[in-house]
Amino acid sequence: MRARDLIEVVEDLVRELHPQRARFINVIPSSRIERDLGIDSLSRTELILRIERAFHVRLLARAIGEAETVGDLLHALEQAGPARERLAPERKLAPLLLSVPAATDARTLVEVLEWHAARHGDRTHVTVLQDEATSLGNLTYGELAARARKFACGLIARDVEPGARVALMLPTSIDFFVAFFGILYAGAVPVPIYPPSRLSQLEDHLRRQTGILRNVGACLLVTMPEGRRLAGLFAALVETLNAVESVEDIEKSAPDMDLPRFADANSTALIQYTSGSTGDPKGVLLTHANLLANIRAMGGVIQASSDDVFVSWLPLYHDMGLIGAWLGCLHYATPLYAMSPLSFLVRPETWLWAIHRFRATFSASPNFGFELCLNKIDEADLAGLDLSSLRVVANGAEPVSAQTLRRFIARFGRYGLSTQAMAPVYGLAESSVGLAFPPARAPARHRACRPRPAELRWHCGAGDIRISEAA
């Protein structure tokens, strides 16, 4: 009976998504969600919401992400718990950390981490969230530095030399933060690439990443343990790649040894691949000086400090999440609460409730994330929500819609969101990340204009920014 009811929920969505060919699609337990039914990532979010509402349950995020067929969804439904009640306002948690200065004299990212670890090593730096209330672990500055050094020793024992490129394909996790800085401590260069949404897609996904791996000349790929079985395949596809390893294996086998001296400010700290929205992804070499200058410029505009709190669902392979959220928080000693993009896509309200629970002052999202909140969250799921702590919510990484800004402010202003908190921003990997930010606490303004033929124009509070199409 439950299987039949589930199939009816799926059929209803398929009819809405593909009205012209719905009668030719037969939904059965073995139907593959994407390939057979045409349900993409965003449509999957809608499907999950409908299943949870129809059966009054809360599905496990991992089961949702890895479901390939309708039968997998039925199995996830059998494992589901009852729908949770939302957190009461009085359960909000305020950060209990003392104010500390930013690492303003540091010349490299490693010096930033060392500076904080030496002065307040027991200060919590990052907490990884499963949802708005469940922590998957956290790292203090001291713990991150210690584990990163050990990881670096493991890399050097594997003949990773200074300047070598190490690809990093991990989901939002403690392992990502450790591996990223471990690569830097070894004197190598991290190259974040996006992980597969489901482990069953790992081989196909990795095959699609061979272009980046070859282009960057990666000597090592750090990924999930399941990826190690593909080492032989990649040895044939990427001639520079010597191994595919997991964080656990590298840490376990790490010997004690001296690490190389810290890189200088002008050495490459990161290779950030562009989104590929206007062509094939291209690697952008960013130095430590590039990154710290951009982080300090952005932080100066939004008046960032250690008294702030950042809640982010942004992926760590993308510059907005990696640099704007994480490395910015690292520099200013701002506590970061990082949740999986999958958690947000499945239940966008978890982002807002995490902001509520941890009294976040900063957050950010592409425009579609604000639209997802507007279109996929029921009013009943917002009872007691308080967003009044927010000082800055950046909207960037894709075209910003003035209508989205107005609708988001109108709806969530009822839950304490300040009009002045909404900040349309513009950035690109070639500028480290941030290029145009409005002044702090300035309401977003919209100006209709007709660009000249060879010119594009963005308006961002403080004035017009003109960028030639030829550039």
Image (cartoon, rainbow, N blue to C red):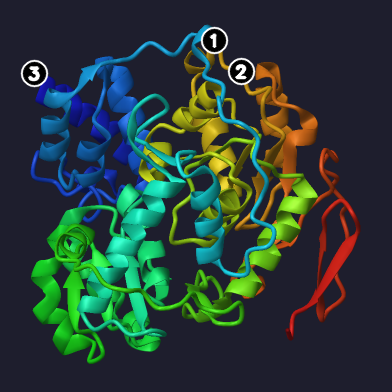
Query: For residue 335, what is the image quadrant?
Result: top right
Q: CA distance from mark 2 to mark 3?
A: 40 Å
Q: Is residue 469 left or right of residue 443?
A: left
At label 3, counting other C-alpha atoms closer than 10 Å, the crowd grade (few under 14, some 14-19, many 20 or more) is: few
Q: Say which mark, if any, is on residue 150.
A: none
The vertical placement of 236 against 322, above or below, is: below
Q: Amino acid at mark 3?
A: Met
Q: Is residue 226 visible?
A: yes
> Camera-side residue: 352 or 270?
270
Q: Is residue 97 left or right of residue 392?
A: left
Q: CA distance from mark 3 to mark 1?
A: 39 Å
Q: Amino acid at mark 2?
A: Asp
Q: CA distance from mark 2 to mark 1?
A: 7 Å
Q: Is residue 141 left or right of residue 346?
A: right
Dot 2 and dot 1 residues touching (CB under 8 Å): yes
Q: Residue at x 50, y 81 (%)?
A: 282
Is tag 3's residue or tag 1's residue first in the polypeptide sequence? 3
At label 2, counting other C-alpha atoms closer than 10 Å, the crowd grade (few under 14, some 14-19, many 20 or more) is: many
x then y, percent, for residue 157: 21, 77
The quadrant of the picture occupied by the C terminus is: bottom right
Query: For residue 30, what is the image quadrant?
Result: top left
Q: Say which mark, if any, is on residue 386.
A: 2
**Residue of label 1:** 89
**Residue of label 3:** 1
